[in-house]
Amino acid sequence: MKTHKPSIKKLAKKLSKIAKEKGFVVQRYDATNSVYLKLDYGVANSIRIGDHDGKKHLSYKFNLLTNIDKSYVEHGEYQRSYYCVEDFEKLIDDILNNKNNVLKKYGVHKYQRMMKKNQLENANKDGFWSKAKLV
């Protein structure tokens, strides 16, 4: 018997809600078959939620995919993590750990300055930045 996978939009809503509760600033952009979330104006990276492989030129540190049954990590110039729906909680833990690692590396004040810098420098850029909404 095949199990029902939640919709991408429902997963994005749930993930956004939890991320906000955990103190992230969340920007959201809904594309045709994917939803993109940027955390803390990108300082804590971004998440792609989809039902298919993404475009090769767009690389996200965190990916929640409804079309895979097992989570995995790709190592390369940058590490990319792919989560199946069943590992939703692991994704939450990993985005929190990632933020904590960035905060440890830069400190709270520099982290906040980096957020402000990203927000100001990218506000009028085409693509994600001009289309995304704050959650």
Image (cartoon, rainbow, N blue to C red):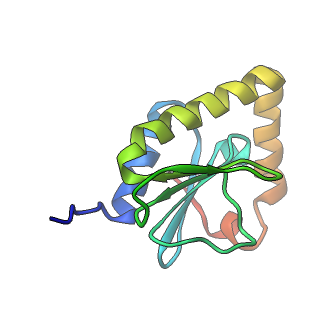
Vertical relation: 66 (above or below) 107: below
Question: Could you tell me which residue is drawn at 84 percent across and 55 percent down?
Answer: 121
Q: Residue 130 or 6: which is nearer the viewer?
A: 6
- The quarter of the displayed image where residue 6 is located: bottom left
Percent coordinates x, y for residue 126 in the rendering:
75, 73
In the current view of this chain or complex, which residue is farthest to the bottom?
A: 32
Q: Nearer the viewer, residue 71 or 106?
A: 71
**Residue displayed at 44% across by 33% down:** 21
In the displayed structure, does residue 22 sit left or right of residue 76?
Answer: left
Q: Is residue 25 above or below residue 98?
A: below
Where is residue 100 drawn, in percent x and y?
66, 25
116 lies above or below 38: above
Tally of numbered discs: 0
At 65% from the left and 33% from the top, the residue drawn is: 98
In x, y percent, where is residue 103? 73, 25
How far across and down, in percent of the image, does residue 31 sit?
53, 74
Give the quarter of the figure containing the N terminus: bottom left
Q: What residue appears at the point 38 percent right and 63 percent down from the top-left corner?
A: 9
On the rendered structure, is 10 left or right of 135?
A: left
Q: Is residue 27 left or right of residue 43?
A: left
Whether residue 44 sits left or right of residue 1 in the image: it is right
